[in-house]
Image (spheres, helix red, strand yellow):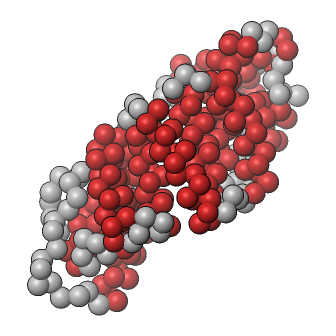
Amino acid sequence: MSAESPGSFGPTEPEDAAPADDAVREVLIRFREAATDAPSDEAKLHLLDLVAREMTARLGRFDRETLVTWREVGCQQDSDGKSAAAVHLLSQVVTDMAQELGPADPDTLVAHLELATAIGNSGDPRAAMQRFQELLPALTAVHGAYDARVLTVQVRLAANQAKAGDVLTAVQQLQGLIPWLQQNLPVGHPLVGEARCALARLVPTFRHLTGTPNGTGLGPIEAVAMVHRLLVWDFASDAEAKTCMDELGRFTGKKGIASRLTSVPENMPAEQAAAMLLA
């Protein structure tokens, strides 16, 4: 397999390459799926990159599975904080998918979603918002309003609205979306957690902007969101986590949040944990 650096789009397929048989295709797909169980994000990215390059050589650059794998490489780059590289790679994937699979193909639309996400993470939330807004009608037309991909666009659109400075609108959107997600997605779906964490990050700023006194408490959606964020430890540092616990205590009037948190049983749902912490 090629040892080229991640971020390039892989080797060009040989013009005289023989078509790969189904067995080769299935093995490469299994390797791609195995990346999910890699011991680290770095290992996952490395394995996905190797599989993508091998697929390019064996199946061809424009094969659907090759393109899907390169899309996953870009997503993992973004997840690892390499958002600029992800934007570069996913832009090429979107172009090739639109050309080979069609602009309305489900895989092409998902690539658009991931590209918009990476653009927002790279520091351009307004460009990301525009892409999400343009993508939403197309995804809805293909999958329907209740589809997880459609709902993902709405959650990430709200998150980028907040990054662009419109915290009030973002909070209102997330407050309405979270019950909708819970109603239309399976229990424990990761998008519910993503939306809750996005809202929890905004609650302190929202309360400050609206002049909400600390003693007025939290609504149930906001309280569960802040507790969920603590349960999954969605923080860059322990100091950030402590700030969240202090804020939750001030907003609810409850003391000893940190010590109560240690007594929450593993895998307890956020709703139950919030009831336990804030009783």
| Percent position of residue 159, x then y | 57, 35
Which of the 4 quarters of the picture holds residue 278?
A: top right
Q: Residue at x 64, y 41 (%)?
A: 195
Q: Residue at x 40, y 75 (%)?
A: 30
Residue 51: tell me if it is visible. Answer: no
| Percent position of residue 66, x then y | 32, 70
Q: Is residue 63 above or below residue 23?
A: above
Q: Front-most of 55 and 102?
A: 102
| Image position of 28 (left or right of 277) | left
| Image position of 176 (left or right of 241) | right
Q: Quadrant of the C terminus?
A: top right
Which of the 4 quarters of the picture holds residue 9?
A: bottom left
Q: Front-most of 117 and 231?
A: 117
Residue 9: tell me if it is visible. Answer: yes
Which of the 4 quarters of the picture holds residue 213?
A: top right
Q: How many marks?
A: 0
| Percent position of residue 125, x then y | 46, 33
Q: Quadrant of the N terminus?
A: bottom left
Q: Residue at x 34, y 89 (%)?
A: 22
Of all residues shown, which one is farthest toward the right?
Answer: 279
Q: Which residue is drawn at 60% across and 36% down?
A: 158
| Percent position of residue 85, x then y | 28, 44
| Image position of 239 (left or right of 211) | left
